């Protein structure tokens, strides 16, 4: 809307007619006083004003207009007569943006109006566009939002304000520094602005979130617009410091009619965005009263709901330390002292375990290399990527890109087998990729609740002679399928690759796991495969003969369905190789809580597998004696050792009671000293082996290995033993909760942990 201010009715009529023909709505006033009254009702998009007028002239009108916060940004063009003594410089200094002299060309005036409307001039003190992203700052958007809110309250017209946040923002800041968010913001601003309506305003809040003002917009249109923004953002990779990252937007929006003022409007939109982020389903969430903080009511909770795990930890200490102490004491006073025998058993257990770790490490120094590829062209191959999209939508696009870049000399099929409780915007992006590249097959598994179901369903669509199984955060090296075929083409049935952590620099937890995975996949797995004569499939980055996997399938009833399937095929004589140079890069948990949940499921799953497969393995005719002994160590010893490892505490406590205190014990007994030294050497030795065989990307972080050695020696080993003991107790108590691990984008992954992997627990 254009406001024309002039006391000359002919000029008003001439200008109004020309602007109306150009498509503008026009209102008029005969002097500055009337113009200010008009502006109180509705703020114009531009003002064309005479200077010399009765009552309130153009200069005084401009002063009052610019004194108002909203009026500071309204473009103003002065019309002056050559015969009038007008100080043009003074007018410009007061805040006029342009001027023309009478008589004037109507076409020129319309062109100047068009230019000012298309690119609104802003005073220096009001230049509040965010210089990094190009959108409005929060304060500028607040001013605009308040004006639109006031207008909506007067007219009753609908309107919305939306808040958009990126879940990966904290991790990206941690990984790349504050500049990462500025880089991300500029690219996000382009996606958000694309398709914006003529009245829409976009700003960047002080917390980094985007604010989208949608005046004159009904609820359905607002939702569709915001859903389009979500699809646009999630469907595009961003570049941060040269690295591609994928982001998951969380959008909340609120109606003008549901807020009292701008502060309330922004607060409610932010709450709705937080609600959307808690679901990670990429759907815009409209604010409802249920999202508001509810008053606290006195509730009666089952104490075990919050205290179950602490109680179980305490119970394992009672069973593993307190009861043995009283057992030794009672036997020593009432029957016969068995503490010396128990001490020798514990020493032997510690020595056996330490020796096995050293042997695995030494054998891993010279891993078995894959045979040369069979002559002729390689066969078609398939990849199955199992995903739970509300949880893994932020990472799966990056994963798809990595698979499409795989360099394999034959037809490659990439199946994304996913389940989701509701339709998601990312599904459209997946279909777009499939339309562009026939190798990619998005396959929604209706009714699925597990990775096992996804993989089993996808097998019916797999066309490759062999199939790689991956989680949604994996990025295999380009030569992975070719290297896997070297094994499978020479008589092997399964080959397990080397999973390398790619977000180790996000937290000390992730760094610890990054080195631990080198100890597992670069040392333990290949060394154990040579020692026992068989390998295992660790849930991802593993390649199967398609026919064998179709026959075997995966059992969703098992918490570690991968280990269960491994043991079933091993018991039938299948050959599983471990190749530390068959690399795929994945994301690790970044918090202790996420790590605890992941490893608890692994440990409990291993216990399930041990209970189910130890006896069948010992009686399997296809296994050699060496392999059966390996199964005893892998399935039996691993479950007993965490309990044996803490027996030194009740034994020493009992000896101290007999001797009158710890100070009276002889700590220099040769067997104790030798055992202690040898056991303590395992940590440095395993860390050294891990460093020597680590992937170059990990090995270049020498400090990570020193940190891992310190953490492992001080607490991490016992941390995992505690988990193993508690996991057994949970299984006995039939507590089998599956906690989905949150995932994030590649560069900044936070809680990502590979919710279906379990090889690391080996």
Image (spheres, grey):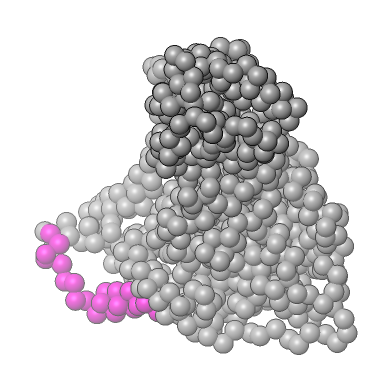
Nearer to me, 622 or 21? 21
The secondary structure that dominates the magenta segment is helix
Q: Residue at x 24, y 61 (%)?
A: 652
Q: Which quadrant of the view contains residue 194?
A: top right
Placement of the N terminus among the 4 image quadrants:
top right
Image location (x, y in percent) of residue 368: 64, 84
Above/below status of 182 relative to 284: below
Count of residue discs: 0
Q: Is residue 204 left or right of residue 540?
A: left
Placement of the C terminus among the 4 image quadrants:
bottom right
Above/below status of 91 relative to 296: below
Above/below status of 545 relative to 729: below
Nearer to me, 195 or 117? 117
Image location (x, y in percent) of residue 36: 48, 17
Whether 673 is among the magenta residues is yes
Q: Residue at x 57, y 36 (%)?
A: 100
Q: Which quadrant of the view contains residue 548?
A: bottom right
Nearer to me, 14 or 687? 14
Residues shaded magenta = 661-685
Q: Residue at x 48, y 34 (%)?
A: 96
Q: Residue at x 49, y 73 (%)?
A: 698
Observer able to see residue 202? no
Image location (x, y in percent) of residue 105: 68, 36
Nearer to me, 469 or 294? 294
Above/below status of 39 relative to 416: above
Q: Which quadrant of the view contains residue 619?
A: bottom right
Image location (x, y in percent) of residue 616: 68, 61
């Amino acid at each position: 809307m254009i406001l024309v201010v002039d006391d000359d009715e002919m000029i008003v009529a001439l200008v109004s007619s020309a602007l109306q023909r150009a498509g503008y709505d026009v209102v008029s006033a005969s002097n500055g006083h009337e113009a200010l009254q008009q502006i109180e009702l509705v703020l114009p998009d531009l003002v064309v004003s005479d200077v010399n007028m009765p009552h309130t002239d153009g200069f005084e009108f401009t002063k009052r207009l610019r004194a108002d916060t909203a009026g500071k940004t309204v473009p103003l063009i002065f019309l002056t007569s050559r015969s009038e003594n007008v100080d043009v410089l003074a007018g410009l200094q007061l805040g006029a943006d342009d001027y023309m002299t009478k008589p004037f060309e109507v076409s020129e005036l319309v062109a100047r109006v068009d230019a000012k409307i298309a690119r609104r001039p802003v005073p220096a003190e009001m230049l509040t566009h965010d210089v990094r992203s190009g959108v409005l700052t929060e304060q500028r958007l607040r001013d605009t939002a308040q004006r639109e809110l006031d207008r909506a309250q007067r007219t009753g017209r609908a309107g919305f304000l939306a808040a958009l946040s990126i879940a990966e923002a904290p991790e990206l800041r941690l990984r790349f520094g504050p500049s990462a968010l500025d880089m991300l913001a500029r690219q996000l601003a382009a996606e958000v602005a694309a398709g914006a309506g003529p009245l829409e305003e976009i700003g960047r809040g002080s917390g980094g979130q985007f604010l989208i003002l949608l005046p004159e917009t009904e609820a359905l249109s607002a939702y569709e617009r915001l859903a389009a923004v979500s699809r646009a953002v999630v469907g595009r990779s961003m570049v941060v410091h040269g690295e591609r990252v994928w982001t998951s937007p969380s959008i909340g929006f609120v109606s003008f009619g549901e807020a009292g003022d701008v502060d309330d409007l922004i607060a409610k939109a932010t709450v709705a965005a937080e609600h959307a982020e808690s679901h990670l389903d990429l759907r815009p969430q409209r604010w409802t009263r249920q999202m508001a903080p509810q008053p606290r009511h006195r509730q009666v909770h089952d104490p075990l709901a919050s205290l179950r795990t602490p109680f179980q930890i305490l119970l394992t200490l009672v069973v593993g330390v307190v009861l043995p102490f009283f057992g030794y004491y009672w036997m020593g006073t009432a029957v016969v002292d068995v503490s010396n025998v128990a001490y020798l058993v514990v020493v032997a257990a510690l020595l056996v375990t330490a020796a096995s770790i050293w042997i695995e490490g030494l054998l891993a120094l010279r891993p078995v290399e894959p045979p040369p590829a069979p002559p002729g062209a390689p066969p078609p191959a398939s990849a199955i990527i199992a995903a739970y999209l509300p949880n893994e939508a932020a990472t799966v696009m990056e994963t798809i890109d990595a698979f499409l870049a795989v360099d394999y000399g034959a037809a490659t099929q990439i199946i994304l087998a996913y389940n989701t409780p509701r339709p998601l915007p990312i599904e459209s992006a997946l279909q777009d990729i499939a339309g562009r590249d026939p190798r990619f097959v998005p396959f929604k598994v209706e009714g699925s609740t597990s990775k096992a179901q996804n993989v089993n369903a996808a097998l019916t669509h797999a066309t490759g002679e062999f199939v790689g199984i991956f989680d949604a955060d994996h990025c295999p090296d380009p030569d992975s399928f070719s290297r896997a075929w070297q094994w499978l083409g020479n008589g092997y049935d399964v080959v397990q690759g080397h999973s390398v952590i790619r977000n180790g620099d996000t937290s000390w937890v992730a760094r610890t796991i990054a080195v631990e995975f080198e100890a597992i996949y670069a040392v333990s797995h290949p060394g154990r495969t040579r020692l026992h004569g068989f390998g295992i499939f660790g849930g991802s980055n593993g390649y199967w003969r398609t026919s064998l996997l179709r026959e075997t399938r995966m059992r969703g009833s098992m918490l570690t369905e991968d280990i269960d399937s491994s043991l079933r095929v091993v018991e039938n004589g299948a050959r599983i190789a471990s190749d530390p140079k068959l690399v795929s890069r994945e994301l690790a948990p970044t918090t202790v809580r996420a790590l605890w949940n992941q490893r608890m499921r692994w440990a409990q799953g291993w216990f399930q597998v041990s209970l189910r497969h130890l006896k069948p393995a010992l009686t399997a005719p296809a296994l050699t004696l060496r392999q059966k002994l390996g199964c005893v160590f892998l399935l039996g010893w691993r479950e007993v050792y965490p309990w044996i490892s803490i027996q030194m505490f009740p034994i020493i406590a009992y000896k101290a009671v007999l001797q009158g205190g710890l100070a009276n014990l002889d700590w220099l007994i040769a067997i104790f000293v030798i055992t202690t030294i040898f056991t303590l050497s395992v940590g440095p030795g395993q860390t050294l082996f891990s460093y020597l065989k680590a992937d170059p990307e990990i090995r270049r972080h020498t400090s990570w290995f020193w940190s891992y050695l310190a953490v492992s020696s001080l607490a991490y080993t016992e941390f995992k033993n505690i988990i193993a003991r508690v996991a057994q107790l949970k299984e006995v108590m039939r507590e089998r909760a599956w906690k989905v691990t949150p995932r994030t984008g590649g560069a900044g992954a936070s809680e990502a942990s590979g919710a279906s992997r379990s090889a690391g627990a080996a």
